[in-house]
Amino acid sequence: MRTLPSILALVALFLAPSLCFADESMGTPAARAQFEKGETARWTGNFRFAVEAYRRAIQIDPDFAKAHENYILYSQFMPPNLQEISSLEKRVVRRRDDDALQSL
């Protein structure tokens, strides 16, 4: 009877690594093509186009790990959304107006 738990423990040890890690892909040909467009754009400093290309690569192959990595990394180099800038500008103007009215 003691051998059954031992066998189950050994099987679990062999299966555990495959259960713990997600399937990673090196990219399907279509995903790699988008990824390469992103790489070219990144090297020329066009981060907006690079991030969009990485996003398209992820849509084509959701398990394409390098596309995810680059998407997250180079999204940080993109300027903020124009709507966010406009909203911030409006708040600054309102704050100045409020301060001016309070000083009267």
Image (cartoon, rainbow, N blue to C red):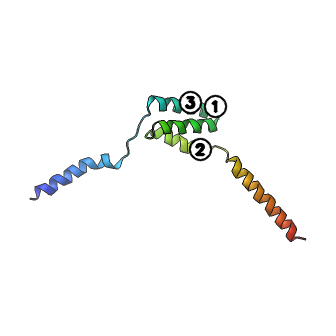
Mark 1 residue crowding within 10 angstroms, few (<14) / some (14–19) / many (20+): few
Figure quadrant of the C terminus: bottom right
Amino acid at pointer 3: Lys
Mark 3 residue crowding within 10 angstroms, few (<14) / some (14–19) / many (20+): some
Mark 2 sits on what residue?
Answer: 75
Residue 64, image quadrant: top left
Residue 73 in the image, given as x and y percentages of width and height: 56, 44
Query: Tag 2: residue type?
Result: Ser
Q: First in sequence: mark 2 or mark 3?
A: 3
Q: What residue is drawn where x is 61% and y is 32%?
A: 41
Label 1 amino acid?
Thr
Look at discs 1 and 2 and give the one toward the viewer: 2
Q: Which residue is mark 3?
A: 37
> Looking at the picture, how far across and down is residue 96, in whole percent?
82, 62
The quarter of the image holding the N terminus is: bottom left
Please tell me whether mark 3 sits on a helix, a strand or a loop.
helix
Residue 44: mark in rendering: 1
Comparing 72 with 104, the one in front is 104
Secondary structure under tag 1 reads: loop
